Amino acid sequence: MKKNEKEIMEIIDYSTDGFGIAKASDGMTVFVPNGAVGDKAEILIVKELKKFCFGKVLNIITPSNDRVEPDCEVFSRCGGCCFRHIDYDAELKYKQKRVADAILRIGGIDTKVNEVLSNKKTIRYRNKGQYPVRKDKNGKIIAGFYSLHSHLVVPCSDCVLQPKEFKAVVDACLDFFNQYNISAYDEQTGKGLVRHIYLRKSDYENKVLVCLVINGESIKNQEILVENLKKFEFVSGIVLNINTKKSNVILGDKNKTLYDKDYISETLLGVKFKISPLAFFQVNRQMTEKLYQTIADFADVKDKIVLDLFCGAGTIGLSIAKTAKRIIGVEIVPQAVENAKGNAKLNGIENAEYICDTAENAAKTLDEKGVKADVVILDPPRKGASEKLINTVCNGFAPKRVVYVSCDPATLARDLKVFKSLGYKIQKVQPVDMFPRTAHVETVVLMTRI
Ligand code: SAH
């Protein structure tokens, strides 16, 4: 197929990005955003690459049985959700299959994968919003979300994944920026002041922490913005985050508090947490409780020594610390480690300790010191765990149980293969839908030493 050619094709599967996949008559694989498995549609080729193409649905001839009316105005322009056009149960089935396929194809392991755990809440489940701020072509300051695979901002202050309160804050910030001529950051030139409006909501307190990420030290007339935002009863704190680096990383490492609190308070499985804007915190609180309950069931930590690697603000370990003998958490971000230590104190937990280092280094040092671990929990970022770390876990600590929490089925599958080669067997695979309507799926795997 060539660019601008069109053909009637059937959508047969989804890609890991949540695009429909079609095969053209010449055998070419075509990725079709917003295609639904079962659609028969006329597809226009919009981009041609060596091994595959990207297509656009021109008109649907026979719609998939899974099709539903999307419940969002910017769906298909915004790069956030990819499944608002199909039935949620179909999405869950696909996610289960995706995890099984990855473990089989990449990991070479044929294993049972449980049905995806979900509370079926597909709107307003997030507690964190990151809105890039830009100047539009009319010179107006806007905020919204990146469009698919680009950094063009689709204006949107009321995303259906976000709490209602976020819209009020974003609109108030934009009014202020436009009224007082506050400049927006320009990624090309690295000039302009406001980069992101970064919001976190606590369900527990029903409060919102406002964090404005700026390319500078202060905002002109910021006291007026503070007064405007303070009018919202639900705003519990306003923070400036200083990020003057020319990079895609959203947050800088320095915060300045403009009003009241510089953290949010939240609870998970009855344990209280204080979270700094710089510390990782799961975005779907209700599903996090289900995720952590699954981890707790798999880890079975009663009277055990537990390593909680990639621990963030200590949330997994602390939520299961009560019955464990000892928890050792490892995390690379200093503010998150401070949060973890503070969170242990806040809950009167005395059997948890934290190390600020890479999981690789800390695990090696602990092992060399002769520290034993009965259970290792690891929850790495998307890139997964390094072979070095997996080696230390399997050959050093050699715990009876390993619980691997993953946000990327592909790197999970790659790592499971290494665990298998070092004597570990998969017992349970539980996908958890932390991010309904997006292409993401979380997976918890229990492995035991053979
Ligand atoms: N378990 C936590 C956090 C998981 S996110 C929770 O459920 O909330 C992954 C965490 O790994 C992040 O906090 C990130 O800062 C941290 N991280 C990333 N690379 C790391 C590394 N090499 N060593 C240790 N921690 C790392």
Image: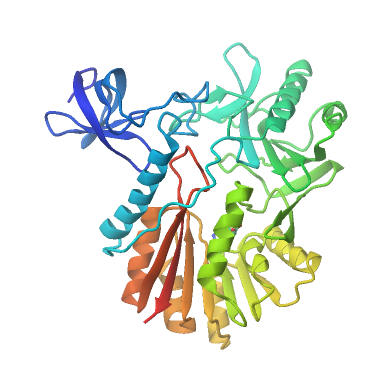
What residue appears at the point 73 percent right and 17 percent down from the top-left corner?
178
Residue 290 screen position, x and y as percent: 57, 56
Q: Front-most of 60 and 371?
A: 60
Residue 36 location, quadrant = top left
Q: Residue furthest bottom?
A: 370
Q: Is residue 338 left or right of residue 113?
A: right
Q: Where is residue 94? Give x, y as percent.
A: 36, 44
Residue 314, compared with residue 278, is above or below; it is below
Give the quadrant of the N terminus. top left
Residue 74 image position (x, y, % from top left): 51, 23
Q: Judge left or right: residue 206 versus residue 84.
A: right
Q: Quadrant of residue 338?
A: bottom right
- Residue 120, relative to residue 374: is it above or below? above
Q: Is residue 61 at least partly visible in the picture? A: yes
Residue farthest left in this picture = 26
Residue 235, by quadrant, is top right
The C terminus lies in quadrant: bottom left
- At x 81%, y 27%, the residue is 220
Name which residue lies at 37% across and 76% down: 424
Up-down: is 272 above or below 305?
above
What percent of the width, then of the height, locates residue 362?
A: 57, 74
Residue 229 as seen in the image, left or right of residue 156: right
Looking at the image, can residue 193 be seen? no
Q: How is the image coloured?
A: rainbow
Residue lying at 63% horizontally and 37% vertically, measured from the top left: 129
